[in-house]
Each structure stands twice: as C-alpha cells, then as structure tokens.
Image: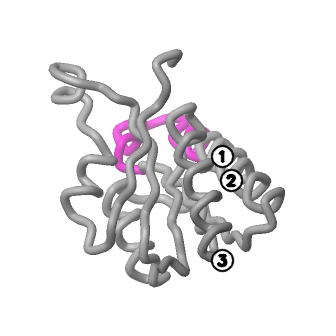
Amino acid sequence: MYEHILVPTDGSAASEGAVDHAVDLAKQYDATIHALYVVDSGSYTSLEAGSDIVLEALKDEGKTAVGLVVDAAEEAGVDVESRVQTGTAHRAILDYAEAEGCDLIVMGTHGRTGLNRYLLGSVTERVVRSSDVPVLTVRAGEEE
C-alpha cells in the first residue's frame, strides 16, 4: 500500500509521535521512510547581521531532528533517507513528496486552536489542504 513515507520533522514532541506512527506503517508495508527538516529561510531574511549564523544553527538543529528519525527507523529495521533543506516549509514538503514519489505524509500537529492557530498558521494544515497524497496527522499528547 505504501512504498515511500515522508516524515517532515522539527524535532518537537509533536514530531516524535508522527515518527512512531510512520515507522510502524513503514515496517508493516516494507516502505522507506523519508525524514525531512526544512529551514524556513524566509523567516530570517530580515536579519542583517548574523543571519548566516542563525541559518547554520537551524541546519544543525535539522540534522539532529532527522537523526532521531533515522535512529528510530534503523532500530526498527526500516529503510530510511534523510535531508535538511531550506525553503518555505509547506511548499518544500509538498515538492519533496512529489519529487521522491512519496505516497503518504505523516506529520505531527501541535494541536493549537483558535487565535493561536490563526496568528501562527499551521504548516501541517497547509500541507493537508494542498497535498495530492494522503496526509496522516498525529496530534501531540496533552503533556506538551
């Protein structure tokens, strides 16, 4: 049913739950996990001094985040690929899914509602609304 499962991650608790679900599905269907961290470079272009330092720190954070996905997949005996890239988060996720032939996207959601969701927006919501492939959303636990 699934051959390539994309797991966009930001290293948060919400992402951890999505990783667990994705690994379980990949194991069941003998699929490959694709771990993706997107450095949203557009958010930091207004910084004049130090933007390179910020972007490098975010890339390092991304390497750590995808590393956690790689570790979980390898521990379960699941094939895994990982990438850290820059761009607009929802667009990069959708483009990656298309380019790599992913047939499922598994994403965490922070469970924001009301004004917080309106003001902050939601990468997950944008992906759900725009994706050509199914998107499984996993809500973070209440302990967050």
Rendering quarter of residue 84: bottom right
Residue type (three-letter) at the residue carrying disc 1? Ala
Alpha carbon separation for disc pair 1 and 2:
7 Å
Q: Start and end of the magenta stretch?
A: 41-55
Alpha carbon separation for disc pair 2 and 3:
16 Å
Where 14 sits versus 95, above or below?
above
Eye-nearest disc, 1 or 2: 2
Report the side of 142 relative to 70 (left or right).
Answer: left
**Which one is nearer the viewer's eye here, 72 or 86?**
72
* Disc marking residue 65: 1
Where 17 sits versus 144, above or below?
below
Q: Residue furthest top?
A: 143
Labelled pair 1, 2 in contact (Cβ < 8 Å): yes
- Residue under label 3, please give it: 30
Eye-nearest disc, 2 or 3: 3
Residue type (three-letter) at the residue carrying disc 3? Asp
> Which residue is painted at 64% across and 58% down in the image?
23
Q: How many marks?
A: 3
Report the side of 17 relative to 88 (left or right).
Answer: right
* Circle 2 SS class: helix
- Residue under label 2, please give it: 69
Label 1 neighbour load within 10 Å: few <14, some 14-19, many 20+: many
> Which residue is painted at 48% across and 59% down in the image?
86
Residue type (three-letter) at the residue carrying disc 2? Val
> Which residue is painted at 43% across and 43% down in the image?
138
